[in-house]
Image (tube, rainbow, N blue to C red):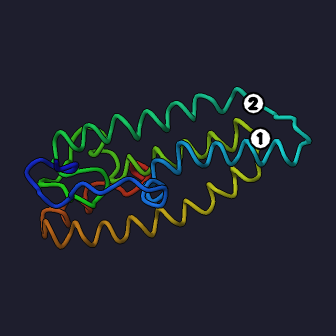
């Protein structure tokens, strides 16, 4: 059974291992990091956890953006999660008409929510690291997409900002 795009044949069934599970950026962002931040905060605060409700909407927004935009991209562009199974088409409508990386942006919004919700320096450090990490990942992704789609992707990059509409 193919787990990627039904037409791609590029991704085959492999047994799920912890290492493979941890390679998933979404598993780390939405499961491992929250558990780690909570455990860290409990450890450094003697079993006490500070919860700032102001951060909860950011958690919800970030996850919802990642999840819903991911479904949208796969439906319109084909391919699979991430670029392991690349898209068949450029998606330049919906959220992709505002920014080129709304799924990655969802990860970062979630991590901001994690730092704010638990008033956590560990969460803030994760966010700071991942701003850099996702930027590097985007540079690699964009090179692959440009090689795959050529001038059409170059034109898309010229029209749509990478991270913040109308800014960067």
Helix, strand or loop status at disc 1 = loop
Residue 88, placed above or below residue 132: above
Residue 116 in picture, x, y percent from top left: 70, 39
Residue 109, placed above or below residue 142: above
Q: Dot 1 surroundings within 10 Å: few (below 14), some, or many (20 or more)?
A: some
Report the disc number at residue 119.
1
Tags 1 and 2 in contact by the CB under 8 Å rule?
yes
Q: Where on the picture, by quarter, is residue 132?
A: bottom right
Which of the image's four quarters has the C terminus?
bottom left
Q: Which of the two labelled residues, at mark 1 and mark 2, occupies the earlier sequence position?
A: 2
Residue position for label 2:
52
Left or right of 48, for residue 26 = left
Residue 164 in picture, x, y percent from top left: 44, 50
User: Residue 10 versus residue 87: which sits nearer the camera?
Assistant: 10
Left or right of 88, for residue 165 = right
Which residue extends farthest left?
7
For the point 41% across and 66% down, the residue is 137
Q: Where on the picture, by quarter, is residue 64?
A: top left
Q: Where on the picture, by quarter, is residue 67?
A: top left
Residue 93 in picture, x, y percent from top left: 21, 42
User: Residue 150 versus residue 23: which sits nearer the camera?
Assistant: 23
Residue 110, placed above or below residue 51: below
Which residue extends farthest right?
46
Q: Dot 2 surroundings within 10 Å: few (below 14), some, or many (20 or more)?
A: some
For the point 75% across and 30% down, the residue is 52
Left or right of 79, for residue 119 = right
Helix, strand or loop status at disc 2 = loop
For the point 50% across and 32% down, the residue is 61
Q: What's the CA distance linking mark 1 and mark 2?
A: 7 Å
Which residue extends farthest front?
15
Report the disc number at residue 162.
none
């Amino acid at each position: 059974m193919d787990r990627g795009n039904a037409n791609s044949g590029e991704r085959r069934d492999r047994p799920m291992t912890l290492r493979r599970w941890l390679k998933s950026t979404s598993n780390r962002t939405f499961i491992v990091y929250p558990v780690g931040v909570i455990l860290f905060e409990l450890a450094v605060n003697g079993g006490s956890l500070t919860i700032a409700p102001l951060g909860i909407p950011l958690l919800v927004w970030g996850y919802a953006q990642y999840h819903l935009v991911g479904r949208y991209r796969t439906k319109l562009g084909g391919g699979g999660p991430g670029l392991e199974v690349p898209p068949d088409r450029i998606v330049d409508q919906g959220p992709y008409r505002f920014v080129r990386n709304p799924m990655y942006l969802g990860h970062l919004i979630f991590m901001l929510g994690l730092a704010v919700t638990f008033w956590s320096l560990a969460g803030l450090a994760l966010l700071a690291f991942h701003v850099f990490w996702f930027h590097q990942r985007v540079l690699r992704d964009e090179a692959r997409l440009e090689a795959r789609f050529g001038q059409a992707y170059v034109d898309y990059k010229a029209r749509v900002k990478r991270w913040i509409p109308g800014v960067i």
